[in-house]
Image (tube, rainbow, N blue to C red):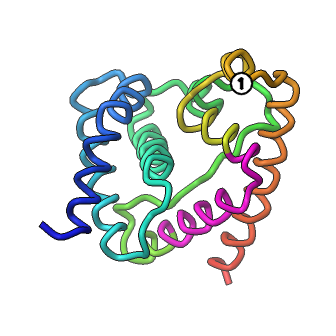
Amino acid sequence: MTDQDGNIAAVFRRERSRLGNFILREVVDASAAEDILQDVFQDFVEAYRLAPAIEQAGAWLFRVARNRIVDRFRKKKEISLDKLSAGAGNDGDEDLRLDLALPSQEAGPEARYARSVLLEALQQAVDELPVEQREVFLAHELEGRSFKEMAATGGVSVNTLLARKRYAVIHLRKRLQAAYDDLEN
C-alpha cells in the first residue's frame, strides 16, 4: 500500500460514520444516502490522486456531500427546499447563506472541469478566511452546529458568531463570483 492509499484509507475510517450520518439526516432514504456516501468518497479518491493533497479532507468531504445532496434535490425534488437552502442548523438569516451552485457531475467533461475549478476556488477561499471566521463557517455549514451550541461551548456570543459567519460568506461570495466570471469568459 502506498502512502497515498494509506492516507485515503485513514480519511475514510475517520470520516465515514460522521459523513454518513450527515447525509442520512438530509436524505431520508438509507439506500440513497449510502449511494451519495460512496459517490463522495469516489470523488475524494479521484481528487486526492489528481490534485495536490487536500488539506482539510473532512471539510472537503462535507462540502462535496452537500453538493451531491443539492444535485439529488434538483433531480428528484425529495428534500424540502427550506431545509436545503437554509443549511443544517441555520437560523434563517438570508445574509448567512452561500448558495453555491455547482454543475452536475453527469453533465459532461466541461461541467466536470467547471465543478473542479469552483471546488478548488472554494477551498482556496475558505483557506483565506481568518481562523475565527473559518471555524464558524465550517462548524455551521458542514457540521450543522447551531450558533447557540457554538456560543455555549466556545464562550463567544451568538452575535459575534453571526458576524463572523456573515463576513465569511461575504468573502466567499466575492471569491466564487470571480471564479464563476472566469469560467464564463
User: At which x and y percent is residue 111?
Assistant: 45, 70
**Residue shown at 71% from the left, 24% from the top:** 154
Q: Main secondary structure of the magenta part?
A: helix
Residue 127 falls within the magenta-colored stretch: yes
Counting from the top left corner in percent of width and height, residue 35 is at 24, 40
Q: Is residue 112 above or below residue 151?
A: below
Residue 98 against residue 2 in the figure, above or below:
above
Residue for point 75% across, 56% down: 173
Q: Quadrant of the N terminus?
A: bottom left
Q: Residue at x 37, y 31 (%)?
A: 18
Left or right, 43 with respect to 134, comes to: left
Q: Which secondary structure, mark 1?
A: helix
Magenta region: which residues? 115-134
Instruction: Please indicate, yes or no, whether residue 173 appears anywhere in the rendered image.
Output: yes
* Residue at position x 22%, y 53% in the image: 9
**Residue behind mark 1:** 154
Tell me if residue 111 is in the magenta stretch. Answer: no
- Coordinates of residue 45 in the picture (x, y in percent): 28, 62
Where is residue 28 drawn, in percent x and y? 35, 21
